[in-house]
Amino acid sequence: MRILVVEDEETIADVIATKLRCEKYEVDVSFDGEDGLYNALTNIYDLIILDIMLPKMNGIEILKEIKENDISAKVIMFTAKSELEDKLKGFNNGADDYVTKPFHIEELIARVNVQLRNKGGKVKDILEYSDLSLNIRTSMLTCKITNESINIPYREFLLLEYFMNNKEQIISKEQIYDKVWGIDNDYESNNLEAYLSFLRKKIKIIGSKVNIKAVRNLGYKMEE
Ligand code: CA
């Protein structure tokens, strides 16, 4: 399960991220509203913890944008103000829960767990595109026409999952590095082309007509 924390107070963001990682969640952190919205729209999260008072763009605006873009992540709003007005704004715009500061980290974690348990039933085990079917629990990729299957190793799986969640869209190298290797990693040392070529071969081996095409100067695109 992957969680985005959008919080400009670094000590608070650190406490939350550290605790969530201890609970075995994957966590990304954004320290301002614009970066938070960018992350929310370009990655796939199960849950977003969203502060209201943020530099560049506030939490209510971000919430509106992510709902307009049909992002399915659960949202827990986070605010220093305990005023009813903020809570109501959050709920009117589709927040699933709210936590008021000062907060107990255990309470926040409990609320996160509740939201993700509710979401549990809706999470799809299978991603599909064209003749391909990817089981995200077993990493097994199947071609529905030939009925051939192949196991996809970790990095290639992350790549493929990203393409299947953004089918027929052009994805830039930067977005791929960000998603598959994480933004802190040294781009040069990760050979994206090599991983893509391993992945293309596996897709071909099972007899699928799907391809991951390079789009000149822009990035890559999965298509039939
Ligand atoms: Ca804040």
Image (spheres, rainbow, N blue to C red):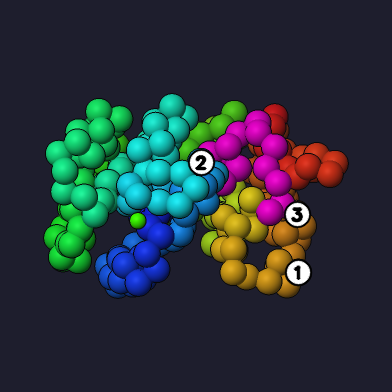
The residue range painted magenta reads 161-174
- In the rendering, which numbered label is found on residue 188? 1
Badge 2 residue CB within 8 Å of ligand 1 = no
State how many labels appear.
3
**Mark 2 Cα-neighbour bin, 10 Å: few <14, some 14–19, many ≥20:** some
Q: Earlier in the sequence, mark 2 or mark 1?
A: 2
User: Which residue is depicted at the point 58% across and 37% down?
Assistant: 166
Q: Earlier in the sequence, mark 3 or mark 1?
A: 1
> Would residue 170 be counted in the magenta stretch?
yes
User: Which residue is depicted at the point 21% across and 50% down?
Assistant: 81
Left or right position of 116 against 161? left
Q: CA distance from mark 2 to mark 3?
A: 27 Å
Residue 167: % across, % down: 60, 34
Which residue corresponds to mark 3?
197
Which residue corresponds to mark 2?
41
Residue 7: % across, % down: 38, 58
| Element under disc 1 | helix
- In the rendering, which numbered label is found on residue 138? none
Residue type at mark 1?
Answer: Glu
> Nearer the observer, disc 2 or disc 1?
2
| Foreground residue among 127 and 66 | 66
Residue 59: % across, % down: 37, 43
Q: Quadrant of the N terminus?
A: bottom left
Q: CA distance from mark 3 to mark 1?
A: 17 Å
Residue type at mark 3?
Answer: Ser
User: Which residue is depicted at the point 14% across and 39% down?
Assistant: 84
Residue 70 seen: no
> Would residue 213 be counted in the magenta stretch?
no
Write down which quadrant ligand 1 falls in: bottom left
Q: Are marks 2 and 3 in contact (CB under 8 Å)?
A: no
> Nearer the observer, disc 3 or disc 1?
1
Residue type at mark 2?
Answer: Leu
